[in-house]
Image: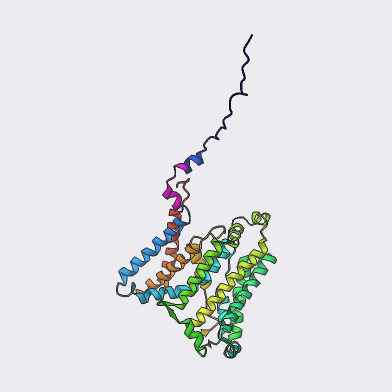
Amino acid sequence: MSEQTTTGADTPLTPTEPPATTSTLAADATPMWRRILSGSVGRNLGLVLALLVLVIVGAATAPDTFLGLSNIMVILRQASIVGVISIGMTLVIIAGGIDLSVGSVLGLASVVGALAAVQDLADQTHWIVMVVVAMAVGVFAGLVNGIVIAYGNVVAFMATLAMLVGARGLAEILADRRTLQVGGQRDFITFMNLDILGVDMLIWIFLVVAVLGWVLLNRTTFGRRTVAIGGNREAARLAGINVKRHVLYLYALSGLCAGIAGVMILGRTTAGTSVNGQLYELDAIAAVVVGGTLLIGGRGTITGTVLGVLIFQTLTNVFIQNNLTSSVQAVAKGVIIVVAVLLQQRFARPSGRSS
């Protein structure tokens, strides 16, 4: 009798592992520190280094004043208003949009908050009315932007450019080209100039807005949807995200930040005028982009934006300490943008590529 052999019935089958690809091997061989630096940590590290360089330059050129506590508070106070605007701008740009109107909306909010009628109402009730009205103006302007962009299918650049011009013109009409004083609202001025733990109220407002923005972007579904829309709007729509409504909310948030900044500038200068916030939109966009947020959307951090704001304000303070002209300041600002971006790219370079 011939023996019968079984070829596979009695032999257990072992799963075959897929062959390792070149990209897999490269990822496994990448050092841990390189993988860490290729993420948001690496992008922010370049900004920290740029900021440290500015601090060293400032300390070397103005050793008697630059590192003083009073000067540090001045830098933070000057950064606070642009910083609040930049938080809202970050969310908009991450979603692939842009808001050129924030500076004009700030000016409009400050003018409306300082109108005699609003101040009379505040006298009869509470100064918080001024704050609510100014913030409401910002939200309304943002909603107009959002409706035109999301539902009118107008390019964000053109829609917000129109708001930039329109809001500035409306502020001039309401103010009649005058400076509207709010010095009579002593409780409001006192509150906005409070020092808590030795830190100015404007800085605390900036800190609170930045923390709330960070939580919104990194710890909520709203933030994840914002990144998804910026990465691929059509894919986000197919995934069930109401893209138009979300874009509307983003521009409303940007307008809200501009309204808050309008209240801050009212408290700082005790006056509302149509020139408030002029060119602040450019400062905000520069800070956001230098902070690592892609102009095409899909990537960005609140931390990077805060660092970007601090870089520009520290740079400005170094110029002032050394009595440099505005022309030199403009050139140096352009250089620092390039340097900061190059540092950012150096530390954030993908691990699998070399150049």
> In the rendered image, is residue 325 in sight?
no
Please say if 82 is above or below 290: below
Q: Position of residue 291 (x, y in %)?
A: 48, 62
Q: Magenta segment: does it hold 194? A: no
Where residue 207 appears, x then y in whole percent?
48, 71
| Residue at the top extreme of this rendering | 1
x%, y% of residue 182? 52, 87
Q: Which residues are magenta?
A: 28-36
Given residues 108 and 262, the one toward you in this image is 262
The image shows residue 261 at horizontal and vertical percentages of 53, 76
Residue 32 inside the magenta-drawn segment: yes
Q: How is the image coloured?
A: rainbow
Exactly how many numbered labels are in the figure?
0
42 sits left or right of 123 in the view: left
Which image quarter: residue 29?
top left
Q: Residue sitting at 37 percent across and 66 percent down? A: 54
Residue at 67% of width from left, 65% of height from top?
A: 245
Task: Decide: is 279 above or below 171.
Answer: above
